[in-house]
Image (cartoon, coloured by chain):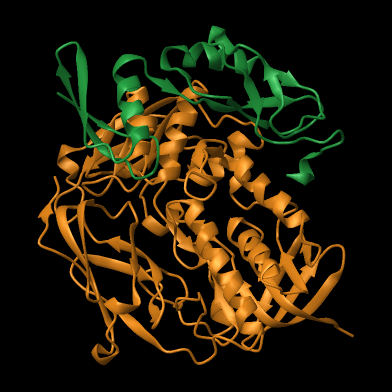
């Protein structure tokens, strides 16, 4: 038996997972998303990764995220790739900054906008 | 001669609360709205909250802080009646709704508003507020300041950190520091339970094997120019440190996540009554304060767990301000809330009769299997904790005017260890 705290939403349901033959018996989830979360957490855990990247010519950073969750095991490799990125303005929210981050098949996207001549005082 | 402008509504603060309130008021027909923001840009705290987890309740999708703010900025652009004044500081609000502002661009400007919405948010409790003994070296940050330095300005604070307090920002920063290569040696929490959301304990600490020491605190900060180490000790049931059981943790950075305080200097000037339990104004179901025509919403009213709730509540305040300007919701009947067993605070504090009111309730201590009682209403709850809002919408039929008040309590629970 494993007890998980669901991280899909702020309710944080405590989900119980039992081995049931070859499958998993999942109870305590408040919604279907919790079922998916518990199954993934037990087999192939995933997380959305967020960070910031440097912007050439600006004192401000640009916030970024993986477009969808990536395997937990790839988070460190993904961070190394993110740290090496410098973007050049303008950048628009939602813009893909790097395809296939750390071989995850998932793109890194901008979660903020930086105009051509954005300077520190605008943030 | 002082420049005075007459407007329908002034919203003080351009964070999530102010933006949502202004948009809702405009949608409800208010024409001349001024949204005043002290910083050079809108969004409040959201641009530095680069993590995901926002928007699940309000937008039904998962967003980061900057993305959540962006949604509201797009909404604001659709409302030409909202004049946005960034880089403008409100220095005074009076009970007759004069709002005195100052900015580099326009100097002193006074707005005479027919209604005011207070949305100034909250501030972090600093080291001085909790009196940690020791030296005063560099390397001590509040979690929100550190979040700004790392996520907006791109600075790293040090190499090894200890975090005091398990509020959500502290937990989020534990993960953020770790991802940037800074070793987080421990998160210390004075209380025997975490003050943050459970999911943040899981995804920020457990994911990265960061130890959480419950019932522990920092008893001394060491170092002359820079933090060199902190002394840590467990605390007894009376929350006093058991120094003889203490130990030292070497670190060059101490991060404080020890609570948020609603920022109500302007509210007090205007004569608004504050609730000592929340630190924010006493409000009714319309988020109307005790001063006629002045409303309050968001973290200035009470500290929220989720920005989604701020948006929902602020939209109520915005629509209510519009109704007030039409001459409605004046002299409405309300009953006061009376906090009973294991209730720290309830917002709104005054419940308008004859309508449903969503309540934000906070428990004093964690419990399992409790019965939440609100007036005549009953609801079972599996787990309650001071770190997590208890939601309940009280219906008109659960309120009895003859009682004279509405009792809120948690009954029959077992203390959760």
Relative vertical location of residue A98 with respect to residue B267 in this rendering, above or below: above
In the image, is A112 to the left or to the right of B337? Answer: right
Report x, y in % for residue B99. 71, 78
The quadrant holding residue B247 is: top left
The spot of residue B397 in percent (x, y) is 30, 78
| Most distant residue in the right direction | B1
Along the line of sight, the residue nearer the viewer: B159 or B363: B363
Letter of the chain shown orange in the rendering? B
**Above or below, comparing residue B319 to residue B84 in the picture:** below
Residue located 70% across and 60% down the image:
B38
State which quarter of the image contains the N terminus of chain B: bottom right
User: Horizontally, is B11 left or right of A76 in the view?
Assistant: right
In the image: residue B45, left or right of residue B104:
left
Q: Is residue B191 above or below residue A44?
A: below
Q: x, y (%) of residue A59?
A: 75, 33
Residue B187 placement: quadrant: top left
Position in image of residue B127 (x %, y %): 43, 52
Q: In this orientation, which residue lies closer to the viewer: B280 or A57? A: B280
Residue B301 visible in the displayed image: yes
Which of the pair B119/B115 is nearer the observer? B115
> According to the colouring, which chain is green?
A
The residue closer to the viewer here, B76 or B45, is: B76
Q: Is residue B186 visible?
A: no
Using the rendered view, name the quadrant where residue B98 is placed.
bottom right
């Amino acid at each position: 038996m494993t007890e998980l705290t669901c991280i899909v939403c702020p309710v944080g349901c405590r989900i119980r997972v039992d081995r049931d033959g070859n499958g998993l018996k999942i109870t305590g989830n408040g919604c279907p998303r919790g079922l998916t979360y518990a199954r993934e957490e037990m087999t192939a855990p995933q997380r959305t990764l967020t960070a910031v990247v440097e912007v050439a010519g600006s004192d401000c950073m640009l916030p970024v995220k993986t477009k969808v969750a990536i395997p937990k095991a790839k988070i460190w490799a993904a961070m190394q790739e993110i740290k090496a990125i410098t973007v050049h303005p303008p950048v628009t929210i939602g813009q893909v900054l790097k395809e296939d981050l750390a071989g995850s098949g998932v793109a890194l996207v901008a979660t903020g906008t930086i105009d051509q001549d954005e300077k520190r005082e605008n943030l | 001669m002082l420049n005075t402008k007459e407007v329908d509504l002034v919203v003080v603060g351009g964070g999530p609360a102010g933006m949502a309130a202004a948009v809702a008021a405009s949608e409800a027909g208010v024409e001349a709205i001024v949204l005043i923001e002290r910083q050079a840009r809108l969004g409040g705290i959201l641009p530095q909250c680069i993590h995901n987890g926002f928007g699940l309740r309000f937008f039904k999708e998962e967003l980061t802080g900057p993305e959540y703010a962006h949604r509201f900025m797009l909404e604001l652009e659709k409302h030409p009646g909202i004049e946005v004044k960034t880089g403008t500081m409100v220095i005074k609000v009076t009970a007759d709704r004069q709002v005195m502002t100052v900015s580099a661009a326009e100097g002193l400007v006074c707005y005479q508003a027919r209604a005011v919405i207070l949305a100034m948010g909250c501030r972090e409790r600093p080291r001085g507020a909790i009196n940690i003994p020791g030296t005063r070296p560099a390397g001590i940050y509040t979690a929100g300041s550190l979040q700004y330095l790392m996520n907006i300005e791109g600075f790293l604070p040090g190499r090894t950190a200890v975090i005091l307090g398990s509020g959500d920002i502290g937990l989020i920063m534990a993960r953020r520091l770790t991802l940037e290569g800074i070793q987080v040696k421990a998160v210390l929490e004075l209380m025997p339970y975490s003050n943050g959301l459970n999911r943040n304990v899981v995804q920020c600490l457990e994911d990265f094997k960061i130890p959480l020491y419950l019932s522990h605190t920092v008893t001394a900060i060491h170092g002359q120019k820079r933090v060199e180490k902190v002394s840590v000790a467990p605390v007894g049931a009376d929350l006093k440190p058991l120094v003889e059981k203490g130990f030292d943790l070497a670190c060059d950075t101490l991060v404080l996540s020890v609570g948020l305080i609603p920022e109500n200097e302007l509210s007090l000037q205007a004569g608004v009554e504050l609730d000592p339990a929340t630190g924010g104004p006493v409000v009714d179901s319309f988020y109307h304060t005790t001063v006629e025509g002045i409303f309050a919403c968001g973290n200035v009213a009470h500290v929220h767990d989720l920005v989604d709730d701020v948006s929902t509540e602020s939209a109520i305040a915005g629509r209510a301000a519009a109704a007030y300007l039409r001459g409605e919701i004046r002299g409405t009947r309300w009953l006061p809330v009376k906090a009973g067993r294991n209730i720290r605070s309830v917002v709104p504090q005054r419940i308008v009769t004859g309508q449903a009111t969503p309540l934000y309730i906070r428990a004093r201590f964690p419990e399992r299997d409790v019965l939440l009682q609100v007036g005549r209403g009953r609801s079972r709850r599996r787990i309650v904790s001071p770190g997590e809002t208890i939601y309940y919408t009280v219906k008109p039929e659960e309120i009895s005017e003859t009682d004279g008040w509405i009792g809120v309590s948690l009954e029959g629970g077992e203390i959760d260890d």
